[in-house]
Amino acid sequence: MAAEAKPAAASGIAGEMEVEAYRRLFPVAFLERHLGESVRIDARRLREARPTTVALGAVSSAHGSALVRLGDTAMLASVKLEVMSPTAECPDEGSVAVEFHMPPICSPLVRPGRSAEVAPVISKALEDILMSSGMLNLKDLCLITGKASWLAYLDIYCLNADGSLFDAALISAVAAFTHLEIPLVSVGDDGRLFTVGGNDGKNKFELVNREKRNLTLGDIPLSLTCAFHKDSILADPTSEEESIIETYVTVVVDSSDRLVSLQKVGGAVTSMATIKECISLAKERRQSLREILIDSVKAMEVDQTE
């Protein structure tokens, strides 16, 4: 019986190699073969997003941080606060600086010594969405009107790039700001502000802000990217699907289900019915992501009490 099993095992390996070769040589045909059966290459339904996890407090040295996994795509976001002098135009507001990083370890397409072309595009898009959505109230970052305010540096590192990078980056940004705790601040003899830590600091220094607090967030934006191939809509595409499909739309909605942004890349004109379907899928996705974020906050609170 053992001797008879060997050819079967060899045949199985040969079959897998044949499928993998077909997948590499004819990627479009391989994709369409799956879509014809209403299933994705990774066995998902066409309009099904990948499993998503959020872990708050991933970076202990940051004031706010989060590690997000969207399928095999992984993002690490951190927020660091620094005291700055506010501008004359907005003396009672702080500011936010956003930077999206794609180190060579995240994808074989990113070469050492060269920044990924998509990185500055995602950085700009993230900053635009965070500010235009109303999630951040810059007045909450003011310390002393006309004299001092917070500059929040948001850095997002792509640890593994497997599609839907903007979606994963936006989730990680929202999660990091959700976790953000504004530290205590005092004024030194030289007039400079410095952060104060621990209960001893509360008693020793005269504080500008009396209590540590979380940032008050407004309408939270979340997104869903959909790829179009013929008559099929594929939600949350992987990098393999993105390399095959030329047309996709990224929809951003806020916590009130209002449309914040819609961006279409590549391909021919898309029907309004298809766009409306993508917006509907984005609203459903927002609700599931909201529950994931709420669960991550609860998990962090449990860890802090243990």
Image (cartoon, rainbow, N blue to C red):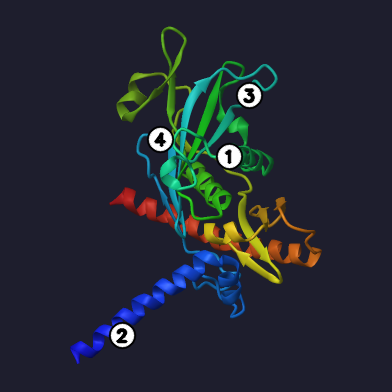
Q: Which amino acid does label 3 sit on?
A: Asp
The percent coordinates of residue 9 (x first, y second) are 29, 81
N-terminal of the pair, mark 3 or mark 2, is 2
The percent coordinates of residue 144 (x first, y second) are 56, 20
The residue lying at 36 percent from left, 34 percent from top is: 61
The answer to whether residue 167 is above or below residue 271 is above
Residue mark closest to the camera, 3 vs 2: 2
Instruction: Identify residue for label 1.
Output: 117
Taking 215 as reference, is 136 left or right?
Answer: right
Measure the C-alpha gap from mark 3 to mark 2. 73 Å
Measure the C-alpha gap from mark 1 to mark 2. 47 Å
Residue mark closest to the camera, 1 vs 2: 2
Badge 3 marks a residue whose secondary structure is loop
Instruction: Identify residue for label 3.
Output: 92
N-terminal of the pair, mark 4 or mark 3, is 4
Q: Which amino acid does label 4 sit on?
A: Ala
Q: Quadrant of the N terminus?
A: bottom left
N-terminal of the pair, mark 4 or mark 2, is 2
N-terminal of the pair, mark 4 or mark 1, is 4
Instruction: Identify residue for label 2.
Output: 8
Q: Can residue 67 be seen in this view?
A: yes
Q: Which amino acid does label 2 sit on?
A: Ala
User: Which residue of the protein is positioned furthest toward the bottom in this rendering?
Assistant: 1
Q: What residue type is labelled 1?
A: Glu
Taking 151 as reference, is 139 left or right?
Answer: right
Q: Indicate which disc residue 62 carries.
A: 4
